[in-house]
Amino acid sequence: MITRSERPKAVFFDVGGVLLSYSSWRAADRHLDRELSRRFPRLNVRLLHEAWSEEWDKRHRLSLSGRFERMRGQAETSLYMALKRLGCRPTRDYVRAALNSWYVEAEKNVEAMPGASDVLRGLSSGGYRIGIITNADWDIVVPQLKRMGLLKYIDYRIVSSKIRSYKPHLRPFREALRESGLKPREAMVVGDNVETDIEPAKRMGMRALLLGRGKRGEASISGLKELLKLLS
């Protein structure tokens, strides 16, 4: 239980794995695997995902080093390069169309995390301001949150494609404080990744709460509904 004097004025959430389930991404992955296997019958899907992950990591490191690129652009280029590495002959137009179908499938299957709606509604009615800090593209994450009925509770929307910066850089967290007008200790960050959510929030002097298991001594909750108990 957090005492009244220690309670934050705003809670900022990561989105993937915190407010929205990863299940829609997994469904979209299966859809894309089927599409790519039809186009390239000899394709080893397991090797493709390994190569795609390696290529995506390269693109993302470039964005973290200052050469910002939207998530969709990173995904498209890295998938194109991975397919070429495995001996396929994709065109850029084909890869773009295949990824578009991935995004359509992901939005169609989007699911909120258990308790997300109840928790946001409870926080909002309790006087807390609510925000998101997410490594995502605005035109992807905002429609998904809206579809799940969560967007109406969110006062501050710190999305990487808008501010051209990714966590774990501190800029997204600085932007959250700037937009909310709060001091660091007046804001809490809830995320599922120690490196990209918890550690940078702490470096900014913000409160941080891990959803899931973390390092020993890390403040954590096993489910979103625990947050309401902590802040009530």
Image: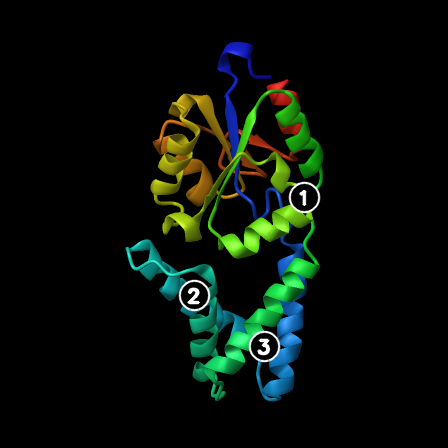
| Mark number displayed over residue 113 | 1
**Above-or-below relation of 100 to 184:** below
Q: CA distance from mark 2 to mark 1?
A: 26 Å
Mark 3 crowd level (few <14, some 14–19, many ≥20, 10 Å Cα): few
Mark 1 crowd level (few <14, some 14–19, many ≥20, 10 Å Cα): some
For this rendering, which residue is in front, 217 or 116? 116
**Above-or-below relation of 154 to 140:** above
Could you tell me if the residues under marks 2 and 1 are in contact, i.e. CB atoms within 8 Å?
A: no
| Mark number displayed over residue 74 | 2
Kind of residue indicated by mark 3: Val
Q: Please name the residue that numbered disc 3 is placed on.
A: 45
- Quarter of the image containing the C terminus? top right
> Is 180 left or right of 213, judged from the image as shown?
left
Q: CA distance from mark 2 to mark 3?
A: 19 Å
Question: How many labels sit on residues?
Answer: 3
Q: Nearer the viewer, mark 2 or mark 3?
A: 2
Q: Residue at x 37, y 32 (%)?
A: 178
Q: Residue at x 67, y 71 (%)?
A: 31
Kind of residue indicated by mark 2: Gln
- Quarter of the image containing the N terminus? top right
Query: Mark 1 or mark 3, which is nearer the start of the sequence?
Result: 3
Counting from the top left corner in percent of width and height, residue 88 is at: 50, 87
